[in-house]
Structures are given as C-alpha cells and as structure tokens.
Image (cartoon, rainbow, N blue to C red):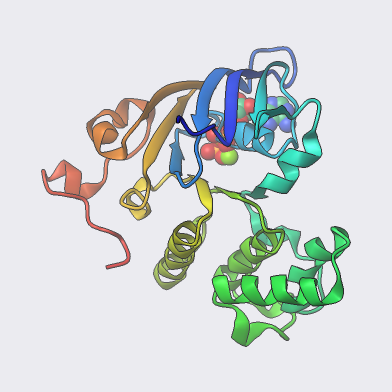
Amino acid sequence: MRTLPLIEVNQLCHDYDGTGGGIQQISFRIFKGEFILVAGKNGSGKSTLFRHLNALLMPTTGDLLVHGRSIRKDPLAARKAVGLVFQDADTQIVGETVADDIAFGPENLGLARNKIQERVDLALDALGLSQLRERNPSSLSGGEKRRLAIAGVVAMDPEVIVLDEPFSNLDHPGTLDLIACIEKLHRTGHTIVLSTHDIEKVITLATRMIILDRGRLVADDLPQALLKHLEPFGVREPCASRLGMAVQPWAS
Ligand SMILES: Nc1ncnc2c1ncn2[C@@H]1O[C@H](COP(=O)(O)OP(=O)(O)OP(=O)(O)O)[C@@H](O)[C@H]1O
Ligand SMILES: [Mg+2]
C-alpha cells in the first residue's frame, strides 16, 4: 500500500501584490520521515513557501493539503501538524525564563499543567537547554536564543518542523550544536524541512533536496543527484564535491 503524503502542494501560487512576485506553480509532496533541504538564492521564494506550510499565508491560486485537508478549509489542522521556526527566529521570545518561554505555546493550546511541564522538559532536553531553564532569555547568546526559538516550536509537538535559515549568524560551535539537535529531532520521528544558503552543513542529513528559482520549483531530487547542478541557481556546491570527493557530515 502506498503511504499517503503528509503534505501535498498543488500548483501553489502566491502573488503578494499583483506583480507576479512570490511563488508560482509549485507542486511537490512531503512524506513522513523525510528531511527536505530547500535551497535557492535570495528572493527565490523559500520563506513564502514555508509560510504556506503552516497556513500563515493562503495561496493566491492552487492549494496545499495537510493530511488531505486543504489549508483554506482547515488552517488550524496545518498549524497543529506543522511548526515553523522563522528566519530571524530570535525575535519571538516572550517569557521571563527559558522554561516560561517554551511553555507559552502549550499553555495557549489549553493543556493541563502536568502535560505542559512534560512538553517543556522534552523540548529543553531536545535542544540541550536544560541547564538554562531558569535563565532570562534576553541573557542568552545568539545560538542559545536560536535553540530556544526551536524549543518553543518543538513543545507544540508538531509532526513536521520547518526551519527557515536556522544557521544564520551562528558561529562554528553554535552551528555544530544546532546540527546535532536537528539530527536528533529527525531521528526521533520528526519530518524536517529546512532552508539554508550553506547546504554543506546539512546535505548529508537530507533525504531530498528542492531548489527554487525566481519563485518556481526547478529541481526536486536526491541531494547527491543535484550536487553538480546547483551553481546556475546561485547555490554553492560543497567544497568536497568540487574537489571530486564525497561530502562528509559537517559535525564530524
Ligand atoms: N510581504 C511581501 N510583500 C511583497 N513582496 C514580498 C513580500 N515578501 C516577499 N516578497 C517577495 O517575494 C519573493 C520571494 O521572497 P521570499 O522572502 O519568499 O524569498 P526567500 O527565498 O525566502 O529569500 P531569502 O533567501 O532572502 O530569505 C521576493 O521577490 C520578495 O521580494
Ligand atoms: Mg527567506
């Protein structure tokens, strides 16, 4: 029996202001357990596409289905299944302590106190923030803030975690920590969709890669199959691949 897609994107178009900007005619499907890397130059439409995955934006034409239900008819089902970590996610902080900040989402879901606590503990652990639970979020480093933003999404218990440019402004150790956290989230059953300009960092974790160019989907294949076809779309080929070597995991 063929598994049903978790998300189905059908001829999706978003035109922000009638000038044809945004995204056009995008179709693809996302299956449970995938790790999809989305690449493309500035303005190619990655963030616009991502904002449809959890129904923050509605299609101008076309549709997007989550578990077979259109986001037009049931945006809440999409928001429950898909957690989006925004580009510049560090600006979303709302709590007085790290733990309070993570609890904010589950509290809004109306969960019982002990359930909220359980979700917060799991998210702290998943993002390596347990030691920092009582800290004021404004005192965290940039890398810690980024992990806090992701923990807030993880605490909502989404099946799919969408990360828009999660590595921007992180130093090398901060990047390595985050890669390890994302790998663990994938290993523990989350479906991951991630955009980055530096595909070298996660290409060995990705099961599939999509390239956007001027709002259109121009490639959708195994990452290995696309390595030699990236540069016309403004995506840098990993160094190892340019030197004719196999690309190694970044964390090793
Ligand atoms: N709120 C908006 N109003 C009008 N046009 C917009 C808006 N947001 C994005 N766009 C346009 O839509 C296109 C796609 O932008 P988007 O932010 O999705 O690209 P991106 O691939 O995420 O870029 P980046 O790599 O810079 O984050 C661009 O041409 C952009 O100018
Ligand atoms: Mg973007």
| 53, above or below 216, in the image | below
Q: Position of residue 106 (x, y in %)?
A: 79, 63
Kindly identify the residue that appears in the image at 75 percent across and 37 percent down.
56
Relative to 17, 147 lies left or right? left
Q: Position of residue 46 (x, y in %)?
A: 55, 34
Kindly identify the residue that appears in the image at 80 percent across and 77 percent down.
114
Quadrant in the picture for the C terminus:
bottom left
Kindly identify the residue that appears in the image at 64 percent across and 18 percent down.
13
Relative to 194, 93 lies left or right? right
Could you say which quadrant of the image residue 125 lies in? bottom right
Q: Is residue 114 something one can see in this rendering? A: yes
Quadrant in the picture for the N terminus:
top left
Residue projecting furthest to the left: 244
Q: Quadrant of ligand 2?
A: top right
| 215, above or below 227, in the image | above
Nearest the viewer among 190 and 219 is 190
Total labels: the figure holds 0
Relative to 183, 159 lies left or right? right
Q: Position of residue 77 (x, y in %)?
A: 76, 40
Q: Position of residue 152 (x, y in %)?
A: 70, 63
Nearest the viewer among 71 and 228 is 71
Relative to 113, 183 lies left or right? left
Q: Is residue 127 something one can see in this rendering? A: no
Nearest the viewer among 79 and 233 is 79
